[in-house]
Image (tube, rainbow, N blue to C red):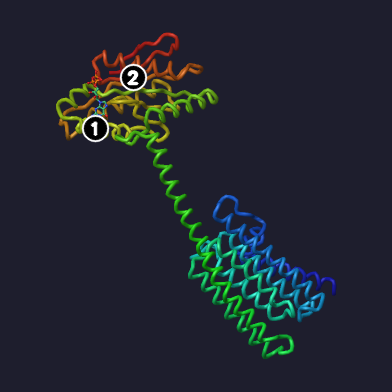
């Protein structure tokens, strides 16, 4: 009977615990998160690293205070101090978990530097209040706390932290003078306070200076990143039409060739050349010609699939890489594009603009230049065949030529 009752009580406790865990979704993420370092986000990784560093320094101070308790310089039993140190450890773990779970991103300052510094200062005050004889030497530990501020704080925050330290220390002196007059020499403590008041502003100033240099560097890095992205875009895109330039197109062609050689899927290369474009330039001017090129590029882009790759090959010549398509399918796509161009309005020139198109299917093992050559031969045939049409190159890689007119 008693056994049964215990088992039931056990079950109730167990299900209550499960319920509690389910009702607290935070716990489900929180504990595993403590052991998960945020590697995928460099900013979060840096924050987690700084928090771990500050935890290590807190651990050193904790060991020091435990030793002081052991030799009778800390007015507290080992058991009570262990309790306080456990609390300090939990607080550090919470900071770390907040970063690992990404919770800190909701805060105005996701690094939580100021909060962590205030936390450390308060713990330092705790140590200063209970430690005897070596209180002056302990003050040097404030420097470690302020070093962490260099990672993030602005001058005003540094000054705030320094003032908070001085006021808290003054309060500790007053409390000691009132509660433990035998353990304090007020004159010496005040002298130490003045010394701290002289050192901290300088520390704050130099810290803020370094912090400013870091943020200027960050800003410059961002500018460099943007400049690099612009350069990369300029190097790979045609300025006039905004589509890929010849170099970038050839890179895409080589990538596709490597993929197809691996996966044995067909792809086609089409070369476009605007018909009588010289006459457009001559009659309507170069800028009208530029506008025609832009409208033409937009018109083709509208018609092609996202997986296909369109680029300016040079002058009024364009190239289209049609992936996963044999020549019959590619030709019907190109025929649709050709009709689209024919029907497109080109307001500045107020006349029909057409294009001749040559297309070749990649033959496994052939070189890129051979493929381009065959597509070019097909384009030449399209020009010769009356323009405004699509012509296919023959499959034979040895013998470049054209066999079929679609229009
Ligand atoms: N506006 C403008 N014209 C360009 C650009 N690049 C090349 N061209 C012109 O394109 C024209 C190409 O003329 P051609 O190669 O003789 O050919 P076409 O007049 O189109 O005749 P077909 O190709 O035989 O139909 C030349 O006048 C070039 O100056 C450009 O970026 N902008």
Report the side of 35 relative to 401 (left or right).
Answer: right
Picture layout, residue 334 above or below residue 243: above
Residue 44 percent coordinates (x, y): 56, 56
**Circle 1: element type:** helix
Circle 1 crowding by C-alpha within 10 Å: few under 14, some 14–19, many from 20: some
Nearer to us of marks 1 and 2 is 1
State the residue in front, 373 or 127: 127
Residue 307 percent coordinates (x, y): 42, 33
Report the side of 20 relative to 260 (left or right).
Answer: right
Q: Which mark is residue 290?
A: 1
Residue lying farthest to the top in this orientation: 399
> Nearer the N terminus, badge 1 or badge 2?
1
Can the viewer see residue 100 in this picture? no
Q: What is the CA distance from the residue labelled 1 to the residue labelled 2? A: 23 Å
Report the side of 400 relative to 91 (left or right).
Answer: left
Does mark 1's beta carbon lie closer than 8 Å to ligand 1? yes
Q: Residue at x 48, y 70 (%)?
A: 156
Residue that mark 2 sits on: 358
């Amino acid at each position: 009977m008693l056994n049964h009752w215990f088992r039931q009580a056990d079950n109730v406790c167990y299900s209550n615990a499960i319920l509690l865990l389910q009702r607290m979704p935070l716990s489900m993420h929180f504990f595993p998160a403590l052991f998960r370092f945020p590697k995928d986000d460099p900013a979060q990784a840096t924050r987690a690293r700084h928090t771990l560093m500050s935890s290590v320094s807190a651990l050193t101070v904790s060991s020091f205070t435990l030793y002081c308790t052991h030799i009778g310089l800390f007015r507290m039993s080992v058991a009570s101090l262990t309790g306080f140190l456990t609390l300090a450890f939990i607080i550090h773990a919470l900071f770390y978990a907040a970063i690992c779970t990404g919770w800190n991103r909701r805060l105005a300052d996701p690094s939580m530097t100021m909060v962590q510094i205030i936390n450390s200062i308060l713990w330092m005050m705790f140590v200063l209040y209970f430690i005897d004889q070596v209180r002056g030497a302990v003050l040097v530990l404030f420097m470690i706390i302020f070093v962490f501020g260099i990672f993030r704080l602005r001058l005003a925050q540094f000054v705030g932290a320094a003032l908070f330290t001085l006021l808290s220390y003054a309060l500790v002196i007053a409390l000691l003078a009132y509660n433990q007059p035998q353990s304090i020499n007020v004159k010496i403590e005040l002298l130490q306070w003045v010394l701290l008041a002289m050192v901290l502003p300088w520390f704050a100033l130099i810290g803020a200076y370094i912090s400013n240099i870091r943020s200027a560097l960050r800003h410059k890095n961002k500018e460099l990143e943007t400049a690099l992205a612009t350069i990369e875009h300029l190097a790979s895109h045609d300025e006039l039409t905004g589509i890929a330039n010849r170099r970038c197109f050839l890179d895409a062609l080589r990538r596709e060739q490597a993929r197809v050689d691996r996966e044995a899927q067909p792809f086609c290369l089409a070369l476009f050349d605007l018909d009588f474009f010289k006459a457009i330039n001559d009659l309507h001017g170069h800028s009208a010609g530029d506008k025609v090129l832009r409208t033409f590029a937009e018109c083709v882009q509208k018609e092609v699939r996202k997986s296909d790759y369109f680029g300016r090959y040079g002058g009024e010549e364009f190239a289209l890489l049609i992936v996963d398509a044999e020549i019959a399918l590619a030709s019907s796509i190109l025929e649709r594009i050709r009709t689209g161009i024919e029907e497109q309005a080109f307001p500045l020139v107020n006349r029909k603009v057409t294009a001749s198109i040559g297309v070749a299917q990649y033959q496994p093992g052939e070189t890129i230049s051979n493929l381009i050559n065959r597509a070019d031969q097909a384009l030449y045939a399209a020009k010769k065949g009356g323009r405004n049409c699509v012509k296919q190159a023959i499959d034979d890689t040895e013998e470049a030529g054209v066999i079929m007119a679609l229009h």
